[in-house]
Amino acid sequence: MDIPGLSMALSQTKVQNDFSVAMLKNMMDLGETLGEGMVEMLDASAMENSVTPHIGGNIDLRI
């Protein structure tokens, strides 16, 4: 049984796992930030509609 090799393999696996968890945390933070930005954009759009409600309410179609 190769104890030093096993120890190195386990250590490398732990480092890879820690890296994966850190990357996942970064992606979750990024997703949360982008989600907050989308909510702010939608709120700004609602504010624009309340200021000028007549714009964009009708569409003229001719066939």
Image (cartoon, helix red, strand yellow):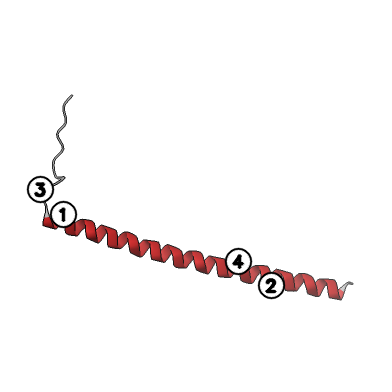
* C-alpha separation, residue under disc 4 versus residue under disc 3: 50 Å
User: Is residue 8 found left or right of 47 in the rendered image?
Assistant: right
Q: What residue did someone put label 4 on?
A: 20
User: Is residue 19 found left or right of 1 in the rendered image?
Assistant: left
User: Is residue 57 found left or right of 23 in the rendered image?
Assistant: left
Sequence-first tag of 4 and 1: 4
Sequence-first tag of 1 and 3: 1
Q: What residue did someone put label 1 on?
A: 49
Q: Residue 27 location in percent, x, y?
A: 49, 64
Q: Which mark is residue 40?
A: none
* C-alpha separation, residue under disc 4 versus residue under disc 1: 43 Å
Sequence-first tag of 4 and 3: 4
User: Is residue 19 found left or right of 43 in the rendered image?
Assistant: right
Crowding around mark 2 (Cα neighbors within 10 Å: few <14, some 14 to 19, many 20+) is few
Rendered position, 34 above or below 57? below
Q: What residue did someone put label 2 on?
A: 14
Residue closest to the eye, 2 or 48:
48
